[in-house]
Image (spheres, rainbow, N blue to C red):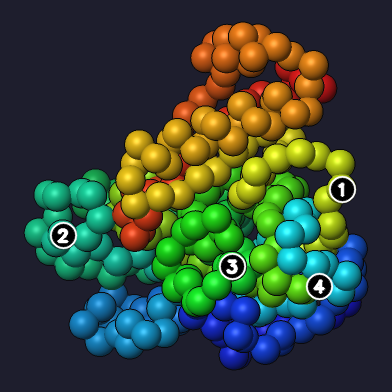
Amino acid sequence: MKRLDASKPFYAFSSELAPALTVAAGESFVLETMDCYGGQLKSPEDTLDRMNWATTNPATGPVYVEGIKAGDVIRVQIEDLKLTGNSVMFTRPGSGKVKGIVTPETSILEVVDDRLRVSTACGELSLPVKPMIGVIGVAPVEGACSNAVPDAHGGNMDCKLIGAGTTLYLTANHEGALFGCGDVHARMGDGEVVICGAETPAVVQFSIEREENLKLKTPFLVTDDLYVAIASSKDLEEAYQMAIDHMFYFLKENTALSDGDIGRLMSLVGDLKFCQVVDPQYSVRFEFPRHLLD
């Protein structure tokens, strides 16, 4: 199986990047990823003022997928995701949306037996890991888009549902798609309110093919239980409206439901949720239960 290590990451999705790996459509391949700090925070003594910010949010790739053309919707199957080290978090005054923090602090969180050990002033917690991918996408239509930014190409969506066993749909804007990923978390809550989750290096196995059957607007995610429309914008109202509209389009184009049926069901069983509120653009998702359609 083809494998790409994290020794030569990229920091912005762009069609100008030379492919680091070429795979056939449907071929399984593996990407090794660094944590979002590029491995620069290794102990509580390491602080952000010592970091090279130009090398944060590294992603591995880009991967050129043979047979993919501009305009194709691609089906990205996340076949496996394994954490390969402990996690790190950094909090500081003014970081994210939590306003009460007064002291900068680097925390190293051990991952033992699929549990995340979190030390607090009141004792240690042991939380189950729920690995997810923060940065995942393809080259944008034009220019370069920093890995810190989520948009229509994917990017830093920080959706906690993007993990092993799920399928992400993206629109290829260029031949080969030029796919990449990074910023894996051992776990993260919706919102990612202090700008980081449990930032962890990982190994991720994928396969990518062209999708020819579903009509949908991307990014779009399918889990065992949910259909999920994801949207990002600098304007929060625009972000959640796009997520709602994209789910409506999916249900309209792929079922025999009437417009009224769709609206009623979206309001009765659909859920509108934040992915993250701390990146240069907000990311919002609309979830719809699969069992009602299946």
Could you tell me the amino acid type at mark 3? Val
N-term-proximal mark, 4 vs 1: 4
Quadrant of the rendering where the N terminus is positioned? bottom right
Residue situated in front as seen by the camera: 178 or 113: 178
Q: Earlier in the sequence, mark 2 or mark 4?
A: 4
Q: Earlier in the sequence, mark 4 or mark 3?
A: 4
Residue 179 visible at all = yes
Placement of the C terminus among the 4 image quadrants: top right
- Report helix, strand or loop for mark 3: loop
Q: Amino acid at mark 4?
A: Val
Q: Nearer the viewer, mark 2 or mark 3?
A: 3
Q: Disc 2 versus disc 1: distance between alpha carbons?
A: 46 Å
Tally of marks: 4
User: Which image quadrant for residue 56?
Assistant: bottom left
Gap between marks 4 and 1, in whole Å? 16 Å
Distance of label 2 from label 4 (alpha carbons) = 41 Å
Residue 87 image position (x, y, % from top left): 46, 66
Up-down: is 20 above or below 114?
below
Q: Nearer the viewer, mark 1 or mark 3?
A: 3
Kind of residue sitting beneath label 2: Gly
The residue located at (22%, 60%) in the rendering is 95
Q: Nearer the viewer, mark 4 or mark 3?
A: 3
- Provide the residue designation for mark 1: 212
Picture quadrant where residue 207 is located: bottom right
- How far across and how far down the image is residue 97, in percent? 23, 49
User: Residue under circle 4?
Assistant: 65
Question: Which residue is labeled 3 in the image?
Answer: 141
Q: Position of residue 137 (x, y in %)?
A: 61, 64
Q: Are marks 1 and 3 in contact (CB under 8 Å)?
A: no
What label sits on residue 94 in the rendered view? 2
Drawn side of residue 96 relative to residue 63, left or right: left
- Which callout, 2 or 4, points to the residue nearer the camera? 4
